[in-house]
Image (spheres, grey):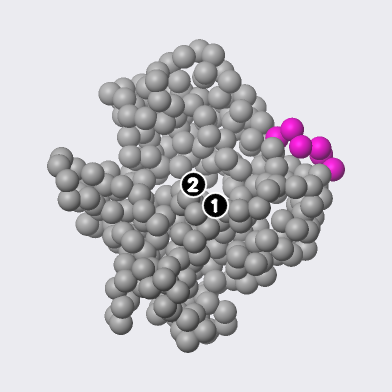
Amino acid sequence: MSTISRRNFVKLSLAGSINLSLLPRGILAMSTNYENPIRLGGPVFTAVSEDPLAWIKAHKDWGYSAAYCPLKADAAPELIRLYESEAKKSNLIIAEVGAWSNPISPDDRQRKDAFKHCCAQLDLADRIGANCCVNIAGSRNPEQWDGPHEDNLSQDTFDLIVEVTRKIIDTVKPSRTYFTLEPMPWIFPNSVESYVRLLKTIDREKFAVHVDPVNLMNSLNNYYNNSKIIKDTFEKLGPYIKSCHGKDTILESQLTTHINETQPGLGNLDYTVYLKELSKLKDVPLMLEHMKEPEEYKAAIKYLQYVASENDLSFLQI
């Protein structure tokens, strides 16, 4: 971004000082050196109803061409089919179904409940035609399902993740979707290399990759070299990537080390590299997450539009 810093851009866009109509129109129809327009998705801040047409319109209004799954696993089969059908008609991809739970918990009941939840969510993803079902691997922490623990990066835990992931996939036997694990700073996969190792060891056709580069920023080296990590991720895992998360990472100047999440444009993540790599893949969406207010999402979208226009890239409109 040669003419304006990313942080100043987001601050100006929040203040209403940037008119997007004056920016290059790469967001809509610019010719590109990369093959595919990028699909963007995120929350639409409307209540989930039984009206798929209203749901689709909300995504169009936000400029999204990808969506989080709007239904729960116990939704009526005909409603699931209706949402899938209408999404296809509108060229809106259902990117992912969340299965957030701890299937490797040391607590027996929590572990069993999480396994059932993962299976139900993977089945929902298959029935609604989502790109993937996504969970983290979990944690051996008995008090925090997604927290750090001294046993998380042991070989025993790696083997347990392999066992549980195989069991989930083999139980559901999905035919159209994939089960994926979102990277985390303190549980496998916590690096590109550990994801490659998991892919090879799990050895299931329906196990694939979910990308969240911010969750790989677990050291100063990774933080300052995130461009290389993003490139390595897509080079080594590209054919297996089904969905990606969009946020940003910021190193705070307080002891000892604090690397936090922030909205796209307010941190250090190299979105030029990220968007370029995404544009090489077809129909792999970038899903915005973890912001609180609609205005934050709007500012993030404006920032991503600007990065795209500066790099001859485009986002898919439906």
Return the mark for residue 308.
Answer: none
Kindly check if marks 1 and 2 are in contact, taking CB atoms under 8 A apart as contact. Answer: yes
Name the chief secondary structure element in magenta. loop
Q: Is residue 36 left or right of residue 246?
A: right
Q: Secondary structure at mark 1?
A: strand
Residue hosting label 1: 242
Question: Could you tell me residue 137's position as x and y percent?
Answer: 45, 32
Residue hosting label 2: 209
Q: What residue range appears in magenta?
A: 73-78
Question: Could you tell me residue 145's position as x and y percent?
Answer: 44, 27
Q: Residue at x 45, y 56 (%)?
A: 246
Q: Is residue 226 visible?
A: yes
Mark 2, Cα crowd under 10 Å, few <14 / some 14-19 / many 20+, is many
Of all residues, the one furthest to the top in this rendering is 108
Of all residues, the one furthest to the front in this rendering is 15
Q: Residue at x 48, y 50 (%)?
A: 292
Q: Is residue 197 left or right of residue 102?
A: left
Quadrant including the C terminus: bottom right
Classify 110 as above or below 316: above
Q: Secondary structure at mark 2?
A: strand
Task: Name the residue type under label 1.
Answer: Lys
Q: Nearer the viewer, residue 102 or 196?
A: 102
Along the polypeptide, which appears first: circle 1 or circle 2?
2
Q: Residue at x 61, y 43 (%)?
A: 97
Q: Residue at x 52, y 29 (%)?
A: 101
Q: How many numbered circles does the render carry?
A: 2
Question: Could you tell me residue 154's position as x and y percent?
Answer: 31, 25
Question: Could you tell me residue 120's position as x and y percent?
Answer: 66, 31
Mark 1, Cα crowd under 10 Å, few <14 / some 14-19 / many 20+, is many
Spatial CA distance of label 1 from label 2 is 6 Å
